[in-house]
Amino acid sequence: MSDGGWVGVDLDGTLARYDGWKEGVIGEPITLMQARVREWLARGIEVRIMTARASGDGAEREISLIKRWCQEHLGQELEVTCCKDYQMVEIWDDRAVRVVKNTGLISDGKDVQDTLLEDSGDIGGIM
């Protein structure tokens, strides 16, 4: 991006199909996101894979696997991270809930309880 910003894209369930954790396995690309990321790259937008796989034990192995996956399915290696910084301008993630800046309000107008309980009846086992 001309301003130095970057777009974070989650891997599992956002850019690649995800049907549960299988060590060393990344799913097939999700066609719509794959096309979107390729378009951003063609326009000179910096895209980074933002994934929990880049943290903890085995992170180096997972990052290497992800970079190879990106080369195969996106035509180039992308930076892989589990961290955001002040240059990140956007994140695309299947688990994110967008809130209105400085309000705590959910930007899509849903009630927070509806969002937390929407898919599974709990919030990922936290409650």
Image (cartoon, grey):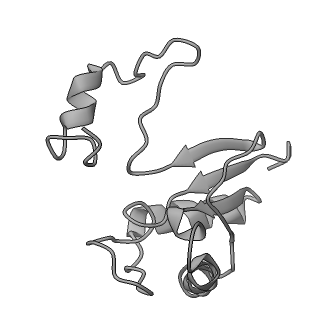
Tell whether 103 sits left or right of 83.
left
Relative to 40, is 2 on the left or the right?
right
Give left or right: position of 43 versus 97: right
Toward the top, the furthest residue is: 103
Q: What residue is drawn where x is 38% and y is 80%?
A: 28
Q: Is residue 121 above or below residue 14?
A: above
Q: Considering the image in quadrants, where does the C terminus appear?
A: top left
Q: Nearer the viewer, residue 107 or 113?
A: 113
Inspect this view and state whether residue 35 appears. no
Q: Is residue 74 above or below residue 99?
A: below
- How far across and how far down the image is residue 38, in percent? 60, 67
* Residue occupying the point 78% across, 43% down: 87
Q: Position of residue 40 (x, y in %)?
A: 65, 58
What residue appears at the point 34 percent right and 82 percent down from the top-left corner? 22
Image quadrant of residue 102? top right
Left or right of residue 109: residue 61: right
Q: Is residue 90 visible?
A: yes
Seen in the picture, residue 73 relative to 121 is either above or below; the reply is below
**Position in image of residue 52 (x %, y %):** 52, 62
Image position of 17 with respect to 99: above or below: below
